[in-house]
Image (spheres, grey):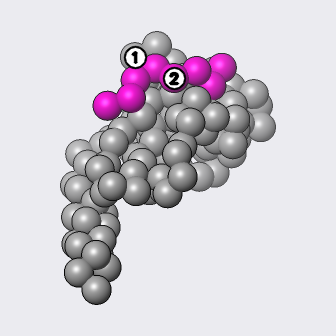
Amino acid sequence: MVFRALFAVIAVSACVLAGAARAGEKEGPHGCLDRMEQRGMVMSRHAVPFAVAIRAIHPRDGDEILRARLCYGARGMVWSVTVLSRTGKVRGVTIDAKDGSLIKDH
């Protein structure tokens, strides 16, 4: 019972933090793409599909992907992924959208 309550608090906190982070992101040509734009970039082969990019994360049992967005990075397109570990730690991962390689795990 206590574990469920703790998990609920962590999950809600992660959602609030993700919402605050999203509020600071720019939409449009210098920020992250919406789903239609993401699909277009993948279909035109300017970005690897997320199913390919997720291999760079090496998710462990119990890890959950909270959010994945295709964004413009300093050197091209990147997948910006938020992961919730089974221990409740939220981490951000940046993956090169051109080849699916891991850029940063923070």
Dot 1 falls on a residue whose secondary structure is loop
- Kindly indicate the quadrant of the structure image that contains residue 88: bottom left
Residue that numbered label 1 is attached to: 74
17 to the left or right of 34? left
Residue that numbered label 2 is attached to: 102
Residue 75 among those drawn in magenta: no
Q: Residue furthest top?
A: 75
At label 1, which amino acid type do we have? Ala
Residue 92 percent across, percent down from the top left: 36, 39
The structure residue drawn at horizontal position 54% and vertical position 43%, both measured from the top left corner, is 59
Q: Can you say whether 42 is above or below 75 in the image?
A: below
Q: Is residue 65 visible?
A: no
At label 2, which amino acid type do we have? Leu
The structure residue drawn at horizontal position 63% and vertical position 34%, both measured from the top left corner, is 55
- Magenta residues, start to end: 99-106
Quadrant (top left/top right/bottom left/bottom right) for the C terminus? top left
Whichever of labels 1 and 2 marks the residue nearer the N terminus, that label is 1
